[in-house]
Amino acid sequence: MLAALVSRLGQMVLVMFGISVVAFLIFFATPGADPSARIAGRNASQETLAQVRHDFGLDRPLPVQYALMMERLFISRDLTSFVNRGQRVVPTVLEAIPITLSLVLGAAVLWVLGGLIVGVVAGATRGTWLDRTLMILSLIGVSIPVFWLGEVANLVTQSRWHDTWLFSWVPPLGYIAFTEDPWGWFKALVIPWFTLATLYIGLYGRVLRASIIETMQEDFIRTARAKGIGERRVLLHHGLRTSLVAFVTMFGLDFGALVGGGALLTEVVFGLQGVGKLTYGALQTLDLPMILATVIYASFFVVMANFIVDVAFVFIDPRVRDAH
Amino acid sequence: MPTDAPLLVVENLCVSFRTEGGVVPAVSGVSFSVEQREIVGVVGESGSGKSQTLLAILGLINSPNAVVTGSVRFLGKELLGLKRRALDAIRGRQIAMIFQDPMTALTPVHTIGDQIVEQIRAHESVSRSAARKRSVELLDAVGLPSPESAVDRYPHQLSGGMRQRAVIAMALSCNPALLIADEPTTALDVTVQAQILELIGRLRDAFGSAVILVTHDLGVVAEVADRVLVMYAGRVVEEGGKGQLLREPLHPYAWGLFGSIPPMHGPRPARLTAIPGSPPKLSQMPHGCAFGPRCTFRHEACAAQPSLGGTGGHRSACFLPQDSRQDLRRTLAGRVEA
């Protein structure tokens, strides 16, 4: 077990190394992506460009550049932005992490609960009006663009109905740290949570429904019914329990991607200075150190989430346990 | 309740499925009864309606397109149309079922023990530890090696034979009055088959359960059954005590079935009897006797549907004259010899 864990961690490090190399090459070595031209500004003379290249170490061989960058990113942690001179990259990312985590964690709780309820209810009432209604609602949820939904939510809660009893509690856009004011943190995030979770509730509900319907055709469900244990127990203890595999796989990937910056649109709409928004800003200005930092951070979460899913499988599916 | 009343009486049971091509009958007018402590073998080819008959008894046909009519009375109580809650009180408690494929019959994510405990606790108010203790005893009784550790195993960690034993242990956990076994040995090795059959026979003696044993293996029937039903195309075509039915089968379909078994004694036949053709499609059932198109002795009367008739406990659904049947049967066998 320990050996499996260690080898798995080793794989994670390798994957992240690969990702960092690829990201580095994309921004530093692809034709036309000359960072020194960016830094020096428009119409810079050849002398200035050469000066910039030398100052930023861009005239050295690529492997050296990569190694230097990683050294400044991970060891001395004093890598600074190319765009906002003096802005340290690592602390900036670290500041953005709690915001993104707060947003995604809350939404994840909502979408797991919502997805479970929608999937189980629709799967159990297959073919009825309840099933159809839930599936149509899910389809709508999946189809609504998150930025539109967020803007509508803002329009209603921040502007049109903000002065009514219904939404007067909604604080202005932005993030309130949990450590400062837990209740304010909750109020500031509850609408973003629902906005971000809508898509996933629909998606997970539909996937779980399909998975439950498939499982309920299995022989062991017939065995369970023949035991006389009641349909609810058959559905939850045998049907749902066996159907969770697809659900957990999806959750791991989506959660990792969102924490890694995939919640960008929600962050922008609700004025949350999270990692997604940081990445977005860095990409717009081609702020290479920042991009590298956020890409590596994101890859860390995706790889981490995969790892956690694998561990979760050990608990969910005993067949996986023995495969190791 | 008089003790000599039959345990289970099935009357005119029909199961049909609505499909795009119209209503397809899977079981048409099946009637039989099972006495206390009796082992009834049900034989027939795949698609002859054996499994559907058994599933219908426990209300386990789950398709929304299935139509089940007729009557199934268990200890005088009508089971068809019973509410789920009332049915659940009988399922697993009084009538238990063993399914065909042990590889897929157990929920993969729960241990054997948990699945047995679940059934015990659904029907009896016993503590978890007491139910677990009984699971171990049951697993021991069905001959699972080292039951104390097997109880905590997951289905995939056991072999097919061991899984089937676990399924049987689960079925027996509440001492059911009737055990329905749907081809319990089909998916198993021959040696394991013999062990499982012996087990089912022994359990009848130990637990006093009646057994309905569905199979397409005539050897299995010869081994353990008291009485035999032969099914063809959704109907019972012959019914009788095992000895009588195996010695002097009355229905031409049964002649074909038994003729296809290599004889253990006497000269070795050059060819075994085969039944020409293949079973009718359920959606294109022939008029009259369903076996007619494949029957060597077909005559005008066969255009009508024969009903089950005969003397004593040995009955068959065939229009051939009773007294000439054994001669006709010998002709069939002789034709192959020649």
Image (tube, coloured by chain):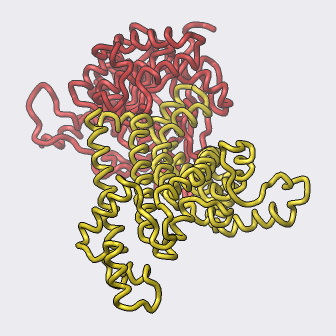
Chain colours: A yellow, B red
Quarter of image, res A144: bottom right
For image coordinates 55% across by 10% down, the residue present is B127
**Vertical placement of B330 versus B280: above or below?**
above
Marks counted in the figure total 0
Q: Tell me, yes or no, if residue A45 can be seen here.
A: yes
Which percent across, then down, holds residue B6? 54, 16
Which percent across, then down, holds residue B148? 35, 13
Q: Nearer the viewer, residue A281 or B159?
A: A281
For image coordinates 51% across by 66% down, the residue present is A279
Which percent across, then down, holds residue A37? 40, 84
**Vertical placement of B55 versus B121: above or below?**
below
The C terminus of chain B is located in which quarter? Answer: top left
User: Relative to residue B167, is residue B269 drawn left or right?
Assistant: left
Which percent across, then down, holds residue A21? 30, 65
User: Relative to residue A56, is residue A163 drawn left or right?
Assistant: right
Q: Residue furthest right?
A: A164
Q: Tell me, yes or no, if residue B301 can be seen here.
A: no
The N terminus of chain B is located in which quarter? Answer: top right
User: Relative to residue B248, is residue A162 drawn left or right?
Assistant: right
For image coordinates 35% across by 73% down, the residue present is A56
Q: Nearer the viewer, residue B181 or B321?
A: B181
Q: Nearer the viewer, residue A67 or B279?
A: A67
User: Relative to residue A306, is residue B296 drawn left or right?
Assistant: left
**Vertical placement of B185 versus B278: above or below?**
above
